[in-house]
Image (spheres, helix red, strand yellow):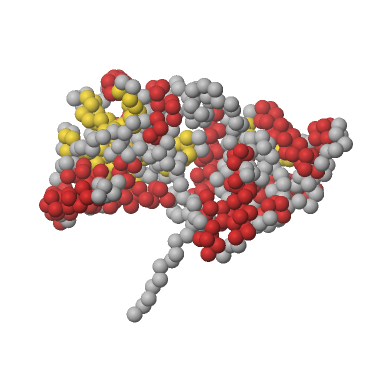
Amino acid sequence: MIRHVVLQIKPEKGNIQGNLERLKKALLDIREESPDVVVLPESFLTAYFLQGGVRELALTQQELFVRLSSMYQELNWPGLLDLVIGFYEREGGTFYNSCAYVELGGRGILHVHRKVFLPTYGVFDEERYLSRGSRIQAFNSRFGRVGMLICEDFWHTVTSTIIALDGAQVVYVPSASPARGFASQNPANMERWSALAQAVAAEHGMYTLLSSLIGFEGGKGMVGGSLIVSPEGKIMVSAPAFEEAALVAEIDLERIPAVRYDNPLLADLQGNLPSILPDLNRVMHRGEK
Amino acid sequence: MKILRADRGSEVLDLNCALLAQYLERFIREELAWRGYKKGLIGVSGGVDSALTLALAVRALGAENVHAVAMPHQRSAPTSFEHAKLVCDAYGVTLDTVDITPIVEGYAQTDPEMTARRRGNLMARSRMMVLFDQSEKHHALTLGTGNKTERLFGYFTWHADDTPPINPLGDLYKTQVWGLSEYVGVPDAVLHKAPTADLEAGQTDEGDLGITYRRADVILEHYLKGYPDAYIESLGYQLSEIERVKTLVNRTHWKRTTPATAVVSSTAINEFYLRPLDFRIR
């Protein structure tokens, strides 16, 4: 059993140190839950909309690790603590929208995923300021094989398919999604996220943890509605829109073989990959007849 | 066999009023908070937009943290002030009054060629001057009251109605303002009267615009989302109405932007140097 907490907490724009303090306080608040893994939203350290401010606020992986280690030491946490955290990353003169999986008190940064699908439409303008990541891959945490996808990455189900085929049993999805559509029970994009997370989890038999940013940024209200979804596609626990919350769930990887045996879609996909890959290649090159 | 036909997909202006009201309350609180304000200030005109803004501000901040100011001119319709008072009484907010006649007429009387339209613009700008001064006096942030329809039509006085730093209703069509106003309990006399800026005698918004808000809003939503004229026509709208809406939108884009600046460098503000309005580094 791996105790997970998804933290849906509001950052302050541009205040990295203040947001680390905020995180520290939240971790102290949930300390009694004894989480093994804590999941934070996309761009938690700075808030989401920075435009050209990315250049001023992005951190290298090393800078991120030093800051998180310092916070971890101040916490006096009993044992290891794994953290999934969204941040703007700088490497040389290149900037990315990234999330890191960090084993605090242990091996440090285990993996950094750089967002591949940068929304540059509507209210979004990421690719003007950021470069695309180019890799989608699972990796080994101390608990098992897991993967990370950031926001729009997850809206293309091919990405979670790759993560699942790469052996992941858990996918972490930090996101930042400004609320749109107020006709239904919840904002339309929050309902879409929920349907998507359930569908992806059920298709691949994979625990799916969505950590969704909250807080207004220049009039745009980040929707929240974070989720932990079981490998059968059932919502185990969900956060409300717009409000701070901590979602707690025990994740039992022992359940995954049973679930996947009942619903062997992933195995079927693996078996059929050789026969469908030519068609994938064909549609990828359509127009090049 | 039962034949079941699918609904034709179309854009709708429906709202979950309870959810939206909570969202806008949160918007008001958060946008005030990071700027360092606890109080809001609203120019209450007697119309439905400022009534709804006041209602949302009271829900967000408490009546004791909302300042309301009526700013009549001697040419204003008496019912405007009566309705402003009615709204403030309904939500338990004290209404201050600043007569803008001396401000407006002090200038207007210097020019014998002053027209009703020019005087109306002077009224709108004078009101904003008063609101910003009252904002300083009470350390209360001024809330804008412009709705999406009038913003899209450019149906406001530039650097006047559109000036306040936060605007809860700016992405709501007038039709949606009516719906949400009904939900929050705006008094019937305000909710059901013909919309007017009350800047010129006998003027109504829909008379000026040449189309009703209810028809304009549906056309606008489809036009903004890129539906072709023929599609909008098929929903029951006249081509002349569609053309009217498109004309009003397309000749007023300049009113929805900051002033055009002659760009001469690669660090021109809002052109190359782009930062969101809430950006700050600590």
Which residue is found at the position 18% from the left and 25% from the top? A107
Query: Relative to A35, does residue B264 appear above or below in the rendering?
Result: above
Task: Tell me if residue A44 can be seen.
Answer: no
Between B99 and B38, the one nearer to me in the picture: B99
Task: Tell me if B120 is positioned left or right of A10 in this view.
Answer: right
On the image, the x and y values in percent for residue B83 come to 73, 49
At horizontal 36% and vertical 78% (from top left) the residue drawn is B2
| Image quadrant occupied by the N terminus of chain A | top left
Q: How far from the left and from the top, in percent, is residue A91? A: 30, 23
The residue sitting at 53% across, 43% down in the picture is B24
Q: Is residue A228 above or below residue B12?
A: above
The residue closer to the viewer here, A77 or A98, is A98
Q: Residue at x 14, y 45 (%)?
A: A254
Q: Indicate left or right for B224 with B259 as reference.
A: left
Viewer-nearest residue: B280 or B225: B225
Q: Position of residue B252 (x, y in %)?
A: 62, 43
Residue A105 in view in this figure: yes
Q: Is residue B190 left or right of residue A49?
A: right
> Residue B188 occupies which quadrant of the picture?
bottom right
